[in-house]
Amino acid sequence: MEQEKLAALIQKVLTDPRILALLRNSIGDGGSAGISKSGADPSVLNAAETRNALDQMPPLWNGSRYCQELPDGSHGSSDTLSSEWAAERCWDVIRVYQPSLNFIAKLATGVADEPLLRLIQQRLAAGGCRIELTELSNVENIGSASYRKLFVGHLATLRSFGILVQSGSSQAMTVTGTKTGLTVSPVPGLWTYKALTERDLLDIEKGTVLTIGRKCIVTSLAADMARRKSIRICREGEGQ
């Protein structure tokens, strides 16, 4: 009787998807902990919203994989974690590959109506986990200047959270001034106007470091606005 109970318990344990995910992703050859059989770093989660993004994810990325469209895990020959298992693990790094504009907007405004958004916002609240967004949609391709400016603001908000935001060229994005407002550039930016006014600072996030030209005129109202919003204004060539 005891043997039957033990056999039933073992069967229950071995059919638990969390145990199966642990065996696939967290136990290395010879029983050594910390390295999976694929050589993936168990402290890094490579996440994607869609199967298409998962398929395009760099194969050499060292870490476990999660796809929001696959809540129970598994996708062809690629092993992915389930939503439940991804949420339970302690990650040092979470990398989101090809996040959509919708994902960016929700993350910046605190909306957590999807598993991956909830996971990231929980980690942000707890601290100690580095969040990276890579291969983003090109904000510069947004046709509407006002809509483009909105998403540039979202990116600035995400950076203020400590999130690393990277473009398709895998270079960090920075805020730059242009005649149509704010845009995103893969290289450190420069405010190109001859003057910086109060109106120019209305759409710039609090805490932003803004580089201006050496001859750029900063109006007194702009200086007041910068102080109120903790925006640091640095002239080109000066230390930041």
Image (spheres, helix red, strand yellow):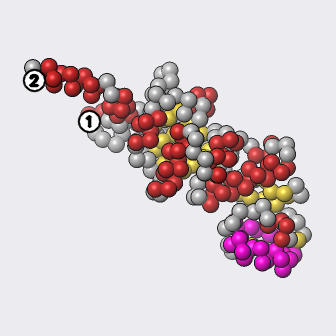
Residue labelled with disc 1: 31
Q: Quadrant of residue 87?
A: top left
Say which element carries label 2.
Answer: helix
Segment tinted magenta in the rendering: 208-232
Q: Residue at x 76, y 68 (%)?
A: 211
* x and y percentages locating residue 165 in the rendered image: 63, 51
Q: Residue at x 46, y 28 (%)?
A: 72
Q: Quadrant of the C terminus?
A: bottom right
Say which element carries label 1.
Answer: helix
Q: Quadrant of the N terminus?
A: top left
Q: Residues within 10 Å of mark 1 (few under 14, many from 20)?
A: few
* x and y percentages locating residue 213 in the rendered image: 83, 70
Q: Is residue 166 above or below residue 51?
A: below
Q: Quadrant of residue 82?
A: top left
Which amino acid is tagged 2? Glu
* x and y percentages locating residue 10 in the rendered image: 22, 25
Which amino acid is tagged 1? Gly
